Each structure stands twice: as C-alpha cells, then as structure tokens.
Image (cartoon, rainbow, N blue to C red):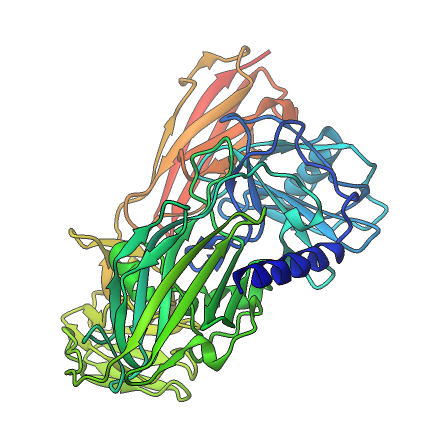
Amino acid sequence: MQKLILLFLCIQFANAQAQYPQDYFRSPLEIPLVLSGTFAELRSNHFHSGLDIKTQQKQGLQVITAAKGYVSRIKISHYGYGKAIYITHPNGYTTVYAHLKKFSPSIEAYIKECQYQKETYEVEVFPTPNELPIASDELIAFSGNSGGSGGPHLHFEIRDKQERPINPMLFGMDIKDSKRPTILGVYAYTKNDSSSINYKKDRVHLRLIPNKNGNYAVEKIKAYGTIGFGVISYDQQDFTYNKNGVSNIQTFYNGNKNFEMDFKRFSFDESKHINRYIDFEFFKDKRSRIQKLFVQDGNTLSMLKDVDNGGYLTINDSVSSVYKIRIKDFKGNDSWITIPITGEKTETKPKTNSIKPMHFAYADQSTVLAEGMVSVYFPANTFYDDTSLNFKVSSDTLLLHKDIIPLQKKYSISYDISNYKTEHKDKLFIAQLYGYYKRPNYVTTTRKGDVLTARTKSLGEFTLTTDLEPPTIKPVNFTNGKWISNLKTLQVKITDDLSGIRNYRATVNGKWILMEYDYKTKKLTHHFSDNVVIDTENNLKIIVTDNVGNSATFESTFFRK
C-alpha cells in the first residue's frame, strides 16, 4: 500500500512541476544557492512568501534579474522588505528581490530622484514598462540587510498575475537537499468533551520513537470519539544548519488519505490564517509551532487539499486502526510517523481553564466591553470561535484576557482621557505590556478630542503611558567644526526609549538631504555620492520626532572639499 501511495504522489509532483516553465528563470545570484528560509515556512503571523538565499554572510553580492522584463515597482521602507525591486516578465510572472543594499546605477539614479523630489527616504513607485526595461542577465541590485532582515541575505519571490507567491523551486531552481525532514513532536487533540486520548482531553503529547530506517513511531494510543493530530517538524538542506520549513504534509487513516497541506502557492490575503492553522496557544507559551492536521472553522487556506472529515478521525470503541503522517521536503525526501490506535471508551472530566472568563464574544457578532475609562470594540468575525474573555480595568491598565487566542482582524481599544491634565494629553499613548518587567510597547494611537484609540490584533495587557522625553541624536563618524573630506558617508545615531521614532528630517545649508534609516542599528546615513553637499562649509540640521510629537534638533558644522 505504501509503495502505491508513493507512486501516486510522485506522479502528482511531476504534474505540478509541469505547470511552470522550467528553463525560463535563472538564479538571481552567481553563487551556489543555499537557503536560510524556504517557501511558505511558518513565520510570525504569516507564511514566508519566497526563498531566503544566503549571501555568504556579507552584503554587496551582485543580484541578477531572473529573466528579461521591466521594473514594475520599487519600494523602500524602514521595515519589512527594506529596499525591494519588482520585475514583471513577458510570461506574466513577477519576480521580487528584497532586503537589498542598493540598486544598479540606473535604477539607483531613478529612485533617488524620486526620493529627493518627495523629500523622503520611504517611497513606493510604479514605473511604466518603457521607463526601466531590463535585459536578460542584467545586474539590477546588490544584496544587503535592509528592512526587517535578521542578517545578510536575498529574499527572492516569484508571483503570478494575481500577485500570488509561488514556490520558486517549482520553476527549476535547484537547491541541494539530501536530508529527510526532522520530526520534533507529535500531539493528539480531542474535538469535544465526548472524546478522549489516553484518558485525557484537549492537547495530548505523544511519545515519539525514532526507528532505524529514519522514520518514526508512536506508542499505541487509546482513544475514543473525534480526534485530530498535530506535528512539529523542520527540514534542513545540504550545506546549512538552518531549520527551514517543509514542503508537504499528508495523513492517511487505515491507508486512505484524509488530509494534505501543500506549500506550493498562496495569496497574501489568506496568510493571516496561519494562526488558525498552528496551535496558537502552544506557540505563545512555548515559542514552537504545532501544525494542526485538521481543519477548524475559519481556516480557509488554499494550500489545504484532499481533506476528509476536516482531517479528523472518528474512533469507535474496541476498534483498532492505524494513522500515518508523511512529511516531505521539496526534493521528495520524506519522513513517516506511524500511530497505532485502539478504540476505548472512557469517562473523563472536562479540563478547567486557569483563566476565569468574565465576558463572552460571539464570533459572528460585534462585541463591546467597557469599564471605567476604557472601552473595547471587537468587530464581527474578529474571533474564529465564540469566545469567553477575561476583561478587567484597574486604574489606567487593561487586562484583556491572555494573548493565546488567534484573531482574524484588528479590534479597537479606547481610553477617555478627559480627567488628565491638559499639558499631558498630547504626550499620552496606548502601550501593550510585554515580558516579566511589563515593558510598554507603543501601539499606533490616534486622538479625537479626549479619546485615544489604538487598533491591534493581539490580546493581552495594555496601559496608558506618558512620554515627555524627546529623542536623542548623536554624531557617529564626525565632530562639530571638523574637516571630513575623506568620508564617504555622514552618520548619526537616533534613539527614543519610549514611544519610538516617528519621522526625521535632515538638511545641509537649508537643503534637504537623503538619510537612510536602519532601525536595527538606529543609524541615519547620508551618502556624499548623492552630490548634494557641494559647499566647503556646511551647516547640518537634523530634526527627529517621536510618536507623541516630542522633537529633538541637532545642529553641527562640517567642512569638505
């Protein structure tokens, strides 16, 4: 039976690859491809939309277009993709290159003209097909570490005409991988109070037993009623120690396929449902992601296929059965888990929740909670399920359950600040409290009259915080009144310890200059190659503003020739 299953899956894989051109796109880097991140692997609040290609722990490698086309979009932001370029190709696909250090000379000149016209570092432009045509094998950029990158690498995507990201490996990109996926944990779940697993309810950890053949087994479990399973796993390609995502997960009950998750293509709109796909509570508590091999209400991921009975099993009393899980990487290396099940009906007590709920929210209805100076508004369909919530206000601190429930959309928290002193109202913001020391973290806050409002997708603890301190600005590679003719850049460090940096503006002799902001190093950098600083004596002025409007001004004089 297992051989027939493997043959069927190989035929499916070959047919899937045939949908995509195999010799159209070349590698974007001229080095052997080694990955630090795979397509659709699990990230915080989203699936990864491309391949993260290692750049040998350095920046500045040449990035080559994967095929001819034209630059259809350029986006530069402090966070996210950082510096990113999008190229649309004649066959309808678009390739994306992100976390770049800089663009090729012609593209760099184009985007800097836009930045100087708009007097802002963060820009997004959509060139016409005739503005920036790209030939085959053309240099388009240099690899970097910009935006939300955790280290030097190139993020590479291929999207279809509907802007849906597709696994680039389906187009023939070759990544060496001879290792089987690794299984770290297996869990079983009861669906309702009439179900049980080893005389327990809810999530049950199962003991994983590695076999000599590289597969895994689980000790025979005793179960009854409707149950499902979940797994923690990763894949590791050759030449790297990174624990990356897998490519495909399938399950079989008594030889019949009843669930598949195929990480081949998805849309950005559905990516938010990752928190419904994983065991969100377990992730928040343990920082590890269990992938649930059953489908709950609201999980509309298009990567799900061949799901029978929602992926759940119905276990009858005194009946033996076998459940198998197959976890596969893109190269077809696979690991199997075999779980023997014996049906045994037993009486169990429902699990009691350590959080005593005070309020209730229906998933399909809007809900308003209010106490004292605080009100919370949940739009309809914020929650996946009807949900009991702990809601408590103490002074200006809101306890809104615990951040263990996945949400589909943002909700609103509002504070009435009419009792605060007038001189402090402009400096107030809503913060979420994190960690053991309850450090406040700014949540984007708006004010209308005497009401402050913040929108967020996380439950937890919130408070009102006052920020009276302006940002700090310190020079990095120069001092006041000195000659700096030998420097290629001008650098300053900007910090704000509470509400965070909102914006900045730099001028030399009254003329705006472009300064790139790297939030990871907290540095602003101006490149003198922009050729806007041309005088011998130069008066630099930088104004930095935080998220509640506190501003700091730095002024200095430097000389160049």
Between residue 499 and residue 108, name the one nearer to us: 108
Between residue 94 and residue 75, name the one nearer to us: 94
Tell me if 546 is positioned left or right of 135 in this view: left
Q: In which quadrant will I find the C terminus?
A: top right
Between residue 367 and residue 202, name the one nearer to us: 202
Q: Quadrant of residue 481?
A: top left
Residue at x 21% of width, y 67% of height: 420
Determine if residue 122 is in view.
no
Tell me if 206 is positioned left or right of 543 in this view: left
Relative to 55, say whether 348 is above or below: below
Determine if residue 123 is in view.
yes
Relative to 75, say whether 224 is above or below: below
Residue 357 in picture, x, y percent from top left: 18, 81
> How many callouts does the rendering have?
0
Tell me if 429 is positioned left or right of 18 in this view: left
Tell me if 534 is positioned left or right of 543 in this view: right
Residue at x 71% of width, y 31% of height: 104
Residue at x 58% of width, y 69% of height: 302
Residue 309 in picture, x, y percent from top left: 47, 81
Residue 220 in picture, x, y percent from top left: 28, 66
Residue 491 in picture, x, y percent from top left: 46, 26
Q: Quadrant of residue 338?
A: bottom left
